[in-house]
Amino acid sequence: TGGEGDTQMDNLSPSDEKPVQRSKSLSFKPQRETCSSCEKTVYPMERLVANNLIFHATCFCCKHCNTKL
């Protein structure tokens, strides 16, 4: 009994639409990660994790001989 254009959305009036409210509590700033060696900010492309510690790939080295790993 409905034509091709009849859908439930066609029957809604503008007063039936409810505006979407965004909660300010949901917006958050990402936590800055710092290198365990140099203590500077580590960005995702240079991030290396070892033993649950975060390093720059260039800071990750042997503590005994200082060779980069």
Image (spheres, rainbow, N blue to C red):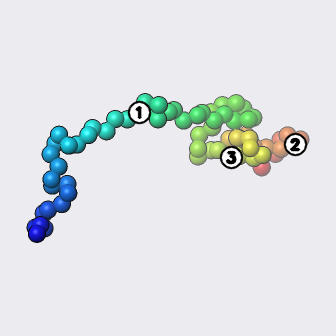
Identify the residue shown where x is 68% and y is 46%: 48
Is disc 3 surrounded by few (<14), some (14 to 19) or many (20+) residues within 10 Å? some
**In this view of the protein, which residue sits in the foreground, 40 or 51?**
51
In this figure, what is the number of numbered marks? Answer: 3
* Mark closer to the observer (3, 1): 1
**Residue extending furthest toward the front:** 1
Contact, CB < 8 Å: mark 2 with mark 3? no
Residue at x-position 13% and y-position 63%: 5
- Give the crowd class for mark 1: few <14, some 14-19, many >=20 residues within 10 Å: few
Name the kind of residue labelled 3 in the image: Leu
User: Where residue 21 sits: x, y (%)?
Assistant: 34, 35
Can you tell which mark lies on residue 12? Answer: none
Q: Residue 19 in the image: x percent, y percent?
A: 27, 38
Give the residue number, with chain letter if any, for mark 1.
Answer: 23
Q: Is residue 1 left or right of residue 67?
A: left
> Residue 59 location in percent, x, y?
73, 40
Residue at horizontal 20%, vertical 54%?
Answer: 9
Quickly name the residue at label 3: 48
| Of residues 54 and 24, the one drawn nearer to the viewer in this rendering | 24
Q: Earlier in the sequence, mark 3 or mark 1?
A: 1
Q: Nearer the viewer, residue 34 or 9?
A: 9
Disc 2 residue type (three-letter): Cys
Determine the CA span between mark 3 and mark 1: 34 Å
Q: SS class of the residue under badge 3? A: strand
Mark pair 2, 3: CA separation: 20 Å
| Label 2 packing within 10 angstroms: few (<14), some (14-19), many (20+) | few
Residue at x-position 54% and y-position 35%:
30
Between discs 2 and 3, the one toward the N terminus: 3
Q: Quadrant of the N terminus?
A: bottom left
| Residue pointed to by mark 2 | 65
In the image, which is nearer the foreground, mark 2 or mark 3?
Answer: 3
For numbered disc 1, what is the local secondary structure? Answer: loop
